[in-house]
Amino acid sequence: MVEAAPKVVVVVPTYNERENLPVLAGLLADLKLPGLHLLVVDDNSPDGTGEVADKLAAEAPGTVGVLHRTEKDGLGRAYVAGMTRALAEGADVVVQMDADLSHPASVLPVMVETLLADDTAVVLGSRYVPGGSTAEEWPWHRKALSAWANLYVNTILGLGVRDATAGFKAWRAEALRAIDLPSVHSNGYSFQVELNYRAVQRGLRIREVPIRFEERIQGTSKMSLGVQVESALAPWKLLREQRRRP
């Protein structure tokens, strides 16, 4: 008897990504990865991304889904909504992936294979392990800020991973349940740090595979000053909350 392929759901939050979303959907489809599904979580994009997502879902019923939200209230809230939906619909593996094409779809099969090979709970697509890199278009100060942010987070929280702020991740469904996903409160990019911290606190195994992180071509970055401030404060908030627990 042939064992069924695990259901892999790629959760992609979107806000004004109408140019990038069809490209990403095509790259994922071209992988021919058994059991692969795409779930778009659109925050009522004014550029019509939600309508583009609906068209993709109509063209690929059963493999592409859309979750429409009525307002834009942060990356973390969008991910929690999408990942919760994926778990409710029977996902075995849930993948976090940006819509801006910065995460290489070609590495996804390696991430899933690595995740399912042993007792690993989450696999990070990492810029900072051997073989990983960032786009050559990145200016030196942006690379320095990224490296400093990872050093900062690891120094405070002791996560023991090279790319603590990575946003390209593959999770086992049971790992997301173990970290109590609905209770995660961080938003913006600090959401990634909180998920890693919860995994480490629960003794879950994290592995990293190298990726090349590309620069966005279409659209604009969502990295605002408020998001940067929240991300800087997040490690201290997580420590404070941990100390308050009995």
Image: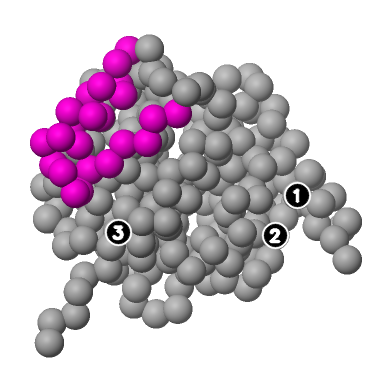
The Cα atoms of the two marked residues, 2 and 3, are separated by 30 Å
Q: Residue at x 73, y 46 (%)?
A: 235
The Cα atoms of the two marked residues, 1 and 3, are separated by 29 Å
Task: Work out which quarter of the rendered image holds the N terminus and state it.
Answer: bottom left
Q: Residue at x 58, y 33 (%)?
A: 188
Mark closer to the chain start, 2 or 1: 2
Residue farthest to the top, as pictured = 46
Asked if residue 52 lies left or right of residue 67, the reply is left
Amino acid type for the residue under numbered disc 3: Val
Q: Report the magenta residues as a range.
A: 47-69
Label 1 crowding class (10 Å Cα cut-off): few <14, some 14-19, many 20+? some
Q: Which residue is mark 2?
A: 158
- Is residue 231 in view? yes
Q: Residue at x 17, y 62 (%)?
A: 34
Please tell me whether mark 1 sits on a helix, a strand or a loop: helix
- Above or below, 6 relative to 13: below
Which one is in front in this view, the residue at disc 2 or the one at disc 1? 1
Asked if residue 91 lies left or right of residue 176, the reply is left
Decide which of 191, 110 is in the foreground and name it.
191
Mark closer to the chain start, 2 or 3: 3
Mark closer to the chain start, 1 or 3: 3
- Residue 56's tag is none
Amino acid type for the residue under numbered disc 2: Gly
Which quarter of the figure has residue 76? Answer: top right
Q: Which residue is mark 3?
A: 8
Amino acid type for the residue under numbered disc 1: Leu
Horizontal and vertical percent for residue 9?
32, 53
The Cα atoms of the two marked residues, 2 and 1, are separated by 12 Å
Please tell me whether mark 2 sits on a helix, a strand or a loop: loop
- Above or below, 77 relative to 218: below
- Residue 238's tag is 1
Q: Residue at x 56, y 26 (%)?
A: 73
